[in-house]
């Protein structure tokens, strides 16, 4: 709920998530869900969307247990499975948000799985400050503006290390392009999970 409140106040302008559980949406956020969501189903032929409740009701009503669309084809969960294409619009929106932000928070991700791993690097290339919050070092750590590594005890941050790389101040109108060494920082090249 804290992120949703920050969005409501205009502090957070966008939330990109790989989580499929819908918790951000239920908390009041409007996330870009690059791996889809369990909260809906979709038709494999016509891409019609249905709620999770409708998906389950159609599965229960089907003689073979397979939920079907109005067009007669199978419905599946809205989650992107391994080898499936990521939702193109969500991926484009995620890269646009990363390239358009002033500060990019990378929280709790390994920055290993592509194409999501490239998002903080895209923000860096566009001149944003990148703050990484993670229990351990990741491939992003050496490039991030600020790194907070450690664990949250529920009452305080148990930091194992904090790293800050001073960056020159910049205006949002005049973003500086700077090279960032990361293989896929170019954009949404690979679209599979």
Image (cartoon, rainbow, N blue to C red):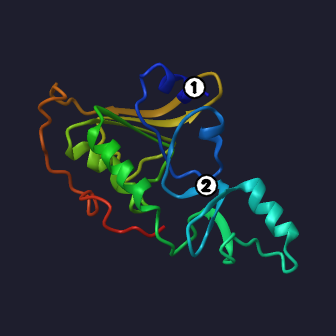
- Spatial separation of the CA atoms under disc 2 and disc 1: 21 Å
Which residue sits at x=80%, y=61%?
56
Q: Measuring from the top left, give residue 145's x and y in whole percent.
A: 28, 35
Instruction: Indicate the secondary structure of the residue bearing disc 1.
Output: helix
Nearest to the observer: residue 61 or residue 7: 61
Q: Measuring from the top left, give residue 103's x and y in whole percent.
A: 32, 32
Q: Using the rendered view, name the quadrant where residue 36 is placed.
A: bottom right
Q: Measuring from the top left, give residue 9's x and y in whole percent.
A: 47, 19
- Compared across the picture, whether 109 is left or right of 140 comes to right
Give the vertical position of 185 relative to 143 (above or below): below
Picture quarter with the N terminus: top right
Q: How many marks?
A: 2
Return the disc, 2 or 1, that comes first in the chain's sequence.
1
Q: Measuring from the top left, give residue 6's x and y in whole percent.
A: 49, 23
Q: Which mark is residue 37?
A: 2
Which residue sits at x=57%, y=75%?
45
Residue 157 visible at all? no
Q: Which mark is residue 86?
A: none
Residue located farthest toward the front when viewing the structure as drawn: 71
Front of the two marks 2 and 1: 2
Q: Which residue is mark 1?
A: 2
Nearest to the observer: residue 173 or residue 127: 173
Instruction: Indicate the secondary structure of the residue bearing disc 2.
Output: strand
Nearest to the observer: residue 27 or residue 54: 54
Give the vertical position of 82 relative to 4 (above or below): below
Which residue sits at x=27%, y=39%?
100
Which residue sits at x=28%, y=62%?
184
- Compared across the picture, whether 125 is left or right of 38 comes to left
């Amino acid at each position: 709920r804290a992120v949703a409140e920050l969005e409501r106040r205009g502090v957070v302008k966008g939330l990109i998530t790989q989580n499929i559980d819908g918790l951000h949406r239920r908390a009041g956020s409007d996330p870009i869900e690059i791996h889809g969501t369990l909260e809906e189903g979709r038709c494999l032929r016509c891409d019609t969307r249905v709620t999770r409740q409708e998906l389950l009701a159609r599965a229960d009503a089907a003689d073979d247990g397979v939920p079907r669309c109005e067009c007669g084809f199978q419905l599946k969960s809205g989650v992107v499975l391994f080898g499936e294409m990521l939702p193109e619009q969500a991926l484009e929106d995620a890269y646009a948000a990363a390239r358009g932000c002033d500060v990019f928070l990378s929280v709790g991700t390994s920055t290993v799985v592509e194409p999501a791993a490239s998002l903080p690097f895209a923000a860096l290339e566009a001149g944003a400050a990148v703050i990484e919050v993670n229990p351990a070092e990741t491939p992003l750590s050496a490039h991030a503006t600020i790194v907070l590594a450690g664990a949250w005890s529920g009452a305080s941050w148990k930091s194992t290390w904090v790293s800050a790389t001073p960056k020159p101040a910049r205006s949002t109108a005049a973003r500086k392009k700077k090279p960032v060494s990361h293989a896929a920082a170019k954009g949404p090249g690979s679209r599979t999970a």
